[in-house]
Image (cartoon, grey):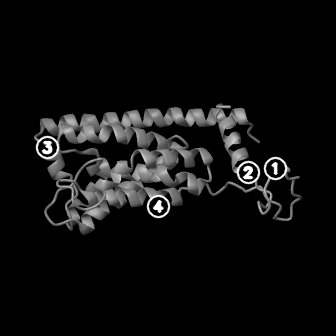
Amino acid sequence: MVDADGRAEVMVAEARKAFFVMFAFVALIWLVQVANAADGYDLSRDHGVVPGETDSLPALLSAPLLHWSWAHIEANSGPLFVFGFLAAYRGVTRFLGLTLLVALTSGMAVWLFERGGVDTVGASGLVFGYFGYVVVRGLFDRHLIDTLIGIVMAASFAYLLTVAVPGTPGVSWLGHLGGLAGGVLGAWLFRERGKRRASGGGGGVPSAAPASRSEGSGGAASPRADLHKELRDLGLE
């Protein structure tokens, strides 16, 4: 069994990896942007998602790395790093699976439903996917810390949803909506299935419940106790 100090060390190590992964990813899209701009944005024209064109299906994976201007990449870089780090800090491997899923759902939403002849590129689909994942992940994983993070992110960045609906000129709201849906789906698909609830079921002998637990709790620890435990695991208490 891993003690609280061990869990904290694992989480810090994962957070460190998440930081460097996101730093490298943002650096990569900026390097691609330098080459793209120097080439007159031919990369965006040649490797973007074009609705209904089967030849552009491989662009589902390349389009998130490309942008149409310096302003375009600048607008995406900050949210990409913040939401990407929050999505990755509990496990980089799971984050990589999430990234692939979001790239596919965002790109397919454009490929299937966007009007013809529009060439779509940009990391904003990933931004919305990571945002959706961060907002709901705590609910599926039953992590109180992540639930609180999700509430704060939802309250602080709710305005992002205004560009996930029709009406913003020059913005692929379908790519945003597809990314958001992929992030929520990813939170469910990549949820922590191995966690066990403390209960008296399964034929085992239940442990004595503290007097402060409410009736009908089934022996489960109170939310406050869970929160204190997670804070101790993080070394914050």
Q: Position of residue 130 (x, y in %)?
A: 42, 49
Tell me the CA gap for discs 2 and 4.
28 Å
Tell me the crowding category of disc 1: few under 14, some 14 to 19, or many 20 or more residues within 10 angstroms, Cα based.
few
Tell me the CA gap for discs 1 and 4.
36 Å
Name the kind of residue labelled 3 in the image: Tyr
In the displayed structure, 64 sits above or below 166; it is above
Name the kind of residue labelled 4 in the image: Leu
Q: Earlier in the sequence, mark 2 or mark 4?
A: 4
Q: Which residue is mark 4?
A: 185
* Residue drawn at x 57%, y 55% as measured from the top left: 139
* In this view, the mark in front (1 or 4): 1
Q: Position of residue 196 (x, y in %)?
A: 72, 56
Q: Identify the mark at residue 91; answer none if there is no mark.
A: none
* In this view, the mark in front (3 or 4): 4
Q: Which residue is mark 1?
A: 212
Tell me the crowding category of disc 4: few under 14, some 14 to 19, or many 20 or more residues within 10 angstroms, Cα based.
many
In the displayed structure, 5 sits above or below 87; it is above
SS at circle 2: loop
Name the kind of residue labelled 1 in the image: Ser
Tell me the CA gap for discs 2 and 1.
8 Å
Q: Would you say the residues marked 2 and 1 are in contact, meaning their CB atoms lie under 8 Å apart? A: yes
Name the kind of residue labelled 2 in the image: Ser
- Left or right, 122 with reference to 93: left
Q: Which residue is mark 2?
A: 222
Q: Nearer the viewer, residue 232 or 215?
A: 215
Q: Nearer the viewer, residue 231 or 70?
A: 231
